[in-house]
Image (cartoon, grey):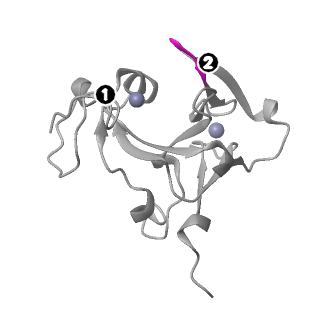
């Protein structure tokens, strides 16, 4: 088998019950641990590993029609951003920005190998912490920490 080019590597993801699934391909635009209060409320978690891809890199892989599988709703205070939520298990799987024309997915929902590790993790693992100002947990890693968006806010560490 010939090695797959990085731009051709696919990452498969799904909701909690697997009724919704998607594939993203290639190199992400951004990969970071997000500590914003929206992510905290949505995921009920101190932070999420969010990975952004251009719209063309994202495709749903469950059977259509999509309206049977998920609800789409605008994000609170961000009407340009739509979120997709599984109708069966209620898990949110992705969001789509109609202004930046990109999808965000959560790394925690991506396919694992036999050891439970996310496949090809080195290619998409987070390279920063963003919205670190509202963190619930300190991270003692070497990744840059930003008050808001990576590269567009004050660096906190
Ligand atoms: Zn589901
Ligand atoms: Zn966030």
Picture coordinates of residue 135, whole percent (x, y): 24, 28
On screen, residue 3 above or below 119: below
Q: Within the image, what quadrant is residue 132 found in?
A: top left
* Residue 28 highlighted magenta (yes or no): no
Q: Earlier in the sequence, mark 1 or mark 2?
A: 2
Disc 1 packing (10 Å; few <14; some 14–19; many ≥20): many
x 50%, y 62%: residue: 112
Q: Is residue 79 left or right of residue 116?
A: right
Q: Start and end of the magenta stretch? A: 76-81
Image mark for residue 48: none
Picture coordinates of residue 66, whole percent (x, y): 79, 35
Image mark for residue 74: 2
Disc 2 packing (10 Å; few <14; some 14–19; many ≥20): some
Q: Are marks 1 and 2 in contact (CB under 8 Å)?
A: no
Residue 6 seen in the figure = yes
Picture coordinates of residue 22, whole percent (x, y): 66, 49
x 48%, y 47%: residue: 29
Q: Determine the secondary structure under disc 1.
A: loop
Q: Within the image, what quadrant is residue 96 found in?
A: top right
């Amino acid at each position: 088998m010939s090695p797959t080019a990085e731009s051709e590597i696919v990452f498969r993801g799904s909701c909690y019950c697997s009724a919704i699934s998607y594939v993203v391909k290639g190199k992400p635009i951004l990969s970071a641990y997000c500590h914003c209060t929206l992510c905290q409320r949505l995921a009920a978690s101190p932070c999420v590993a969010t990975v952004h891809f251009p719209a063309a890199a994202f495709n749903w892989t469950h059977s259509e029609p999509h309206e049977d599988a998920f609800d789409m709703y605008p994000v609170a205070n961000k009407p340009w951003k739509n979120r997709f939520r599984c109708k069966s298990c209620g898990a949110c799987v992705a969001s789509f920005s109609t202004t930046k024309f990109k999808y965000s997915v959560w790394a925690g929902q991506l396919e694992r190998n036999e050891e439970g590790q996310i496949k090809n993790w080195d290619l998409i693992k987070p390279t920063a912490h963003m919205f670190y100002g509202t963190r619930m947990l300190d991270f003692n890693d070497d990744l840059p920490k930003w008050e808001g968006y990576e590269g567009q806010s004050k660096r906190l560490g």
